[in-house]
Image: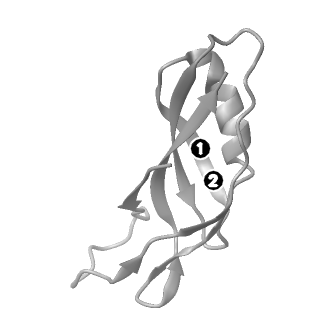
């Protein structure tokens, strides 16, 4: 599972004077995506973008890339159940946008 981190920018926030020290969120638990009956057999990857909020919950989920659109909802349903230790910016919890590759074997 690949995680790509992008710092979340809050609207109306001014640019920081110095770069904050950001510790990425840590994945605590995952759920496997189900394979719908109508999906093509084989190994598939759905990349899901999300914001990990201050409590470690995935929010604002969206499919960023897929090799089989029939698996998108299954991947989103699984990722909604993921749990994270939130990212930390200068020692304080921070909302961070990440991308996760969800592997689905049908």
- Which residue appears at 26% of the width and 73% of the height? 15
Residue 73 vertical position relative to residue 84 in the rendered view, above or below: above
Name the quadrant containing residue 102: top right
Residue 55 vertical position relative to residue 91 in the rendered view, above or below: above
Tell me if 33 is positioned left or right of 21 in this view: right
| Callout 2 touching callout 1 (CB < 8 Å) | yes
Tally of marks: 2
Name the quadrant containing residue 32: top right
- Residue 8 x/y as whole percent: 42, 62
Residue 98 vertical position relative to residue 90 in the rendered view, above or below: above
Q: Label 1's element?
A: strand
Residue at image mark 2: 59
Image mark for residue 88: none
- Residue 67 x/y as whole percent: 48, 20
Residue at image mark 1: 61
Give neighbour class at mark 2: few <14, some 14-19, many 20+ (Cα, 10 Å): some
Q: How is the image coloured?
A: one colour
Q: Label 2's element?
A: strand
Query: Which is nearer the eye, 56 or 106?
Result: 106
- Which residue appears at 71% of the width and 48% of the height? 80
Residue 14 vertical position relative to residue 106 in the rendered view, above or below: below
- Which residue appears at 67% of the width and 13% of the height? 39
Query: Which is nearer the eye, 49 or 15?
Result: 49
- Residue 72 x/y as whole percent: 62, 26
Q: Where is the C terminus found, in terms of image quarters?
A: top right
- Which residue appears at 72% of the width and 24% of the height? 35
- Residue 46 x/y as whole percent: 53, 32
Tell me if 46 is positioned left or right of 83 in this view: left
Query: Which is nearer the eye, 59 or 42?
Result: 42
Give neighbour class at mark 1: few <14, some 14-19, many 20+ (Cα, 10 Å): some
């Amino acid at each position: 599972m690949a995680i790509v981190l992008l710092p979340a920018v809050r609207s109306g926030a001014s640019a920081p004077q110095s770069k904050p020290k950001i510790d990425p969120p840590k994945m605590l638990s995952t759920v496997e995506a189900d394979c719908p009956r109508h999906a093509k057999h084989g190994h598939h990857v759905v990349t899901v973008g999300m914001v990990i909020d201050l409590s470690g919950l995935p929010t604002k989920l969206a499919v960023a890339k897929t090799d089989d659109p029939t698996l998108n909802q299954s991947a989103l349903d699984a990722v909604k159940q993921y749990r994270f230790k939130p990212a930390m910016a200068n020692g304080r919890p921070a909302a961070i946008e990440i991308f996760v590759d969800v592997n689905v074997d049908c």
